[in-house]
Image (cartoon, helix red, strand yellow):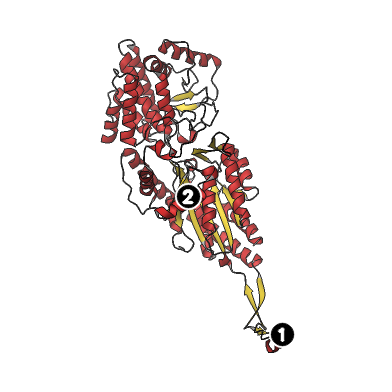
């Protein structure tokens, strides 16, 4: 990907858009370039024609509505395919060269993505492949679902703006159950078509992003609003609260709490920075997923493939993993022996202390015996929390393997252990429990760890803090495996007279750090096994202080995690 675009190419991109729009009186909000950094005449022509033939303010509102969806980039991708269809057909007679430009672009797209699949194996890139094969008159190699969806994307060139927007909204609601309605409170920078989820733009970020076979640029930020309706989640998704809860149960598994219990828990935890959020706590697998379309079917298939991959990678390296488990087990056991040392208590049985017999005779004190006891390792419980947001994609097999090794070592030391993952979707923070404290035979369920949606780290830590307070153990330890990149679609404000802030970057990090400090103040030791990139190390230090470490290979696990656990056992 080209890092920078020359001023000359930027001016050419403007001119291409203005020429197609037949209007030089606006500043384009999209610019497109080839992989070599040259202005992409085909896509700049398409965006210019969208300005020429449609009321662009209405289209902009549509895109702003899509910005608030979890899979915003994919839905915008779909809309752009439909706009391309309509605009090429509309200009066919006026610009006979445009269909040939489309075919040339189609050949480029198939050359890049058609042989070995797409770079990210994304659903809408499969659709784009089928779309461009259709443009070239080739066999589409698409499912009946994809063909039917593409048929509906063949928008008539006769549609005016209102009719076109209405048709797009109908398609999105029919196939994906979303309503692309703009909310003043939740504007983000638009996601570019064909843009991977992990590359979504941050507020004010003007960097280049991948678009189709080339690059795209958003020169201008979008302003945010300051109002957040109470029914924001339901309005955003187009579903009632009951329907949303049913969807969460279908996708992630039935809730462990009934409706009344969940309402009480949300009233307690979903407040302050997490107002208007929801919770879903599950053990997974209890509800049968109702597959509504091929997109959901593909996601389900990928999750099953990831679970199989997690297990396969662990078994491929089973020898080194077993060594790591054994070494970590020994380190934890040695720590317990060293720091949970024996102590003497007086009791009604044991070794008689002659100098205290008088107390039994004169004071009726029966505690005249001495007995040596060991500190009980069972008085310590450990919770392991895995960040399951899409930013962890590409690390899932590594993280699940590390979590399994830690849980297995704790199990061998007979220390109660609970393993959970967290992610957020459509305003819900989802906690999936893989194994609970006394489910010693269920460590293998950790390999069911997959990624979904965003991550509201602060609410996840707050919820786990609440759950850990229900433990009967006096000493509690929380181990978080995370890249420390909080990001969620539900905004928050720190004071009633301030505007709503995006839950990401500094704001999300600050909230997460606050929740970690609250847990520590309540007697919970919190440590982090950092799974992210070098750029996010400062965030890890801000949130966890010195109590975090990075594991680059399984060989480091025993020493690194063992030391972290040992340091916490010291202060018990």
Q: Secondary structure at mark 2?
A: helix
In this orientation, which residue lies closer to the viewer: 327 or 235?
235
- In percent of width and height, residue 101 lies at 36, 16
Q: Quadrant of the C terminus?
A: bottom right
Residue at image location 32% in from the left, 11% down from the top: 96
Q: Quadrant of residue 112?
A: top left
- 367 sits left or right of 138 in the view: right
Q: Secondary structure at mark 1?
A: helix
- In percent of width and height, residue 161 lies at 35, 20
Hey, which residue is sitting farthest front in the picture? Answer: 497
Image mark for residue 266: 2
Residue 465 vs 275, above or below: the answer is below
Hey, which residue is sitting farthest bottom in the picture? Answer: 361
- In percent of width and height, residue 142 lies at 29, 33
Q: Residues within 10 Å of mark 2 (few under 14, many from 20)?
A: some
Hey, which residue is sitting farthest right in the picture? Answer: 355
In this orientation, which residue lies closer to the viewer: 572 or 328?
572
* Residue on which the image places disc 1: 356
């Amino acid at each position: 990907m080209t890092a920078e675009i020359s001023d000359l190419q930027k001016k050419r991109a403007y001119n291409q858009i203005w020429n197609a729009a037949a209007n030089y009186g606006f500043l384009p909000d999209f610019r497109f370039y080839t992989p070599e950094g040259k202005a992409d005449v085909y896509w700049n022509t398409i965006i210019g024609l969208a300005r020429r033939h449609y009321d662009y303010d209405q289209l902009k509102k549509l895109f702003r509505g899509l910005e608030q969806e979890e899979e915003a980039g994919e839905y915008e991708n779909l809309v752009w395919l439909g706009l391309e269809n309509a605009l090429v057909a509309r200009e066919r007679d006026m610009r006979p060269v445009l269909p040939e430009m489309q075919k040339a672009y189609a050949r480029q797209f198939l050359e890049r993505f058609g042989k070995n699949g797409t770079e990210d194996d994304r659903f809408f890139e499969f659709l784009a492949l089928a779309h461009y094969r259709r443009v070239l008159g080739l066999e589409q190699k698409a499912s009946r679902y994809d063909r039917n969806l593409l048929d509906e994307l063949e928008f008539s060139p006769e549609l005016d703006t209102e009719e076109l927007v209405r048709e797009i909204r109908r398609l999105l609601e029919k196939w994906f159950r979303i309503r692309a309605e703009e909310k003043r409170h939740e504007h983000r920078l638009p996601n570019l078509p064909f843009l991977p989820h992990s590359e979504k733009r941050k507020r004010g970020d003007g960097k280049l992003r991948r678009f189709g076979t080339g690059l795209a640029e958003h020169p201008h930020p979008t302003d945010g609003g300051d109002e957040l309706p109470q029914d924001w989640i339901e309005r955003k998704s187009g579903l009632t609260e009951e329907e949303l809860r049913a969807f969460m149960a279908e996708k992630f598994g039935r809730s462990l709490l009934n409706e009344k219990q969940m309402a009480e828990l949300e009233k307690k935890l979903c407040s302050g920075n997490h107002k208007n959020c929801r919770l879903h706590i599950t053990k997974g697998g209890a509800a049968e997923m109702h597959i509504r379309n091929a997109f959901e079917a593909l996601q389900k298939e990928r999750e099953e493939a990831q679970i199989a991959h997690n297990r396969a990678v662990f078994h491929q390296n089973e020898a080194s993993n077993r060594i790591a488990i054994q070494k970590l087990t020994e380190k934890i056991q040695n720590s317990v022996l060293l720091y949970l040392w024996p102590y003497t208590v007086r009791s009604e049985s044991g070794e008689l202390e002659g100098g205290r017999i008088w107390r039994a005779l004169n004071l009726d004190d029966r505690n005249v015996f001495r007995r040596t006891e060991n500190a009980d390792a069972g008085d310590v419980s450990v919770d392991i929390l895995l960040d399951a947001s899409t930013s962890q994609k590409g690390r899932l097999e590594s993280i699940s393997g590390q979590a399994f090794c830690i849980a297995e070592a704790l199990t061998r030391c007979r220390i109660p252990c609970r393993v959970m993952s967290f992610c957020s979707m459509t305003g819900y923070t989802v906690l999936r429990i893989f194994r609970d404290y006394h489910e010693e035979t269920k460590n293998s369920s950790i390999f069911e760890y997959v990624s979904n949606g965003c991550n509201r780290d602060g609410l996840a830590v707050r919820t786990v803090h609440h759950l850990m307070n229900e433990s009967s153990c006096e000493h509690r330890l929380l181990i978080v495996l995370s890249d420390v990149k909080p990001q969620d679609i539900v905004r928050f404000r720190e004071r009633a007279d301030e505007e709503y802030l995006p839950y990401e970057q500094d704001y999300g990090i600050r909230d997460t750090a606050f929740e970690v400090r609250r847990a520590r103040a309540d007697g919970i030791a919190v440590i982090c096994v950092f799974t992210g990139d070098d750029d996010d190390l400062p965030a890890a230090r801000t949130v966890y202080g010195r109590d975090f470490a990075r594991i680059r290979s399984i060989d480091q696990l025993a020493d690194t995690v063992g030391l972290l656990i040992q340091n916490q056992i010291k202060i018990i």
